[in-house]
Every structure is written in structure tokens, then in C-alpha cells.
Image (cartoon, helix red, strand yellow):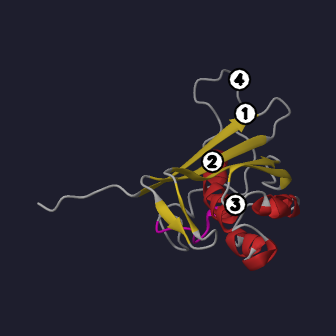
Amino acid sequence: MDKKTLVHSRDVSINIFSMDDGTLLAEGSLRDNRKFPSYSYAAKRFIDPGDIHHIVVRLYVSVPENVITRAEADMIAVPGGGICLEIKDSIKNLAGVCVKRGFTKKVLDIMGDVRGCLHIRSLVIAMGSAIVQAQYHRVEKDSPGTDIPEMDTSIFKNSCWLWREGGPYIGKAKS
């Protein structure tokens, strides 16, 4: 068997919290870690192993509308000194965006190319599907007296094989 050597790892973590005011807080973290000294072509020098990126994004989402009411990011570790910090507030432009079909395109329209940070954008896109997943399963089974919350299940339509038009789930869901 060939020997393999770990050179880089990317860890993405997304947690969704129910807030006292009825909103959801999606908190995502992206961490890139280089495992050996490497050459930075931008800095024109060798850099030590360790975190290259450590970014935390928080999206506050209204329920059941699934609209981002506030978005913020912390760039704990970034290459290039403070230069990357200049674009971190571009995430605030996501306020008002609905997390539904077309979310990725909307994020790319707002934060794509030089209008935002590639790493924040990638994390936000991953967070979108986690937010939808959390919305779908947000009623706790053992909560006494819990009413089934309203939900627009059209956000799932054609999102995957199970939710395809004419598929096994799309007709069973109550919109």
C-alpha cells in the first residue's frame, strides 16, 4: 500500500441554534490547516505549518420565512495580514436574502468574485443547506403541547432525488 502524508486539512463545522426570540442562528466555521512548512507565492517567503484560515460566520434567520435578518463574520486567521479583513463586512449584504431554491446563485451574485471572500462564500453556501435541514426538523418530538410549525416545503422541491417533482416526498409534504 502507498504511504500517504497529510499535507493540508479543511474542517467545516455548522451548528444551528434555536434562539429565544424564535429565530435560528446558524454558526459556521471554516479552518484550513497546513501540516508542513510551505512557500507562499504571494508573500514570497516560506510560512510555518498551522492555520491558514480560521473564519466564523453567523447568520440569523427568521422563522418560518427563512430570511437572513443579520449576517456577520470573524476572520480569526487569514493570510496576507490584515488585507483580507477589508472584505469581511461584505457578508452584511446577505441580510434580506431568503434561504431557498436559488440561494447559492444569490450568494454568488452578492459575494462572488472580488465582491467577497471565497472562503466566507463557500462556508455560507454550505450553511444554506444546513439551515434548510434544521428548519425541516426543528420540532422536537418530545416537547409536550408543541404545535407543528408552518413551513413552506417548496424550498425542498427539486433539491434532491427524494424531493424531485413527482418524487416520493413532494406530494406527501404539507405546504
Q: Which residues are magenta?
A: 156-161
Left or right, residue 44 beside residue 64: left
Answer few, some or many: residues within 10 Å of disc 3's Cα (few below 14, many 20 plus, some between 14 and 19): many
Q: Is residue 148 above or below residue 34?
A: above
Residue at point 52%, 73% (across, down) = 166
Q: Where does residue 6 sit, x and y in percent of width and height?
A: 34, 55
What is the spatial separation of the Cα atoms under label 1 and label 4, in whole angstroms? 6 Å
- Indicate whether residue 16 is drawn in magenta: no
Q: Is residue 97 visible?
A: no
Q: Nearer the viewer, residue 143 or 171?
A: 143
Left or right, residue 104 beside residue 97: left
Residue 147's tag is 1
User: Helix, strand, or loop for circle 1?
Assistant: loop
User: Helix, strand, or loop for circle 3?
Assistant: helix
- Indicate whether residue 157 is drawn in magenta: yes
Q: Nearer the viewer, residue 22 or 32?
A: 32
Q: Quadrant of residue 16?
A: top right
Residue at numbered disc 2: 29
Residue at numbered disc 3: 120
Which of the two discs, 1 and 3, labels the residue nearer the N terminus? 3
What is the spatial separation of the Cα atoms under label 2 and label 3, in whole angstroms? 9 Å
Q: Is residue 140 visible?
A: yes
What is the spatial separation of the Cα atoms under label 2 and label 1, in whole angstroms? 32 Å
Which of the two discs, 2 and 3, labels the residue nearer the N terminus? 2
Residue at point 78%, 33% (across, down) = 19
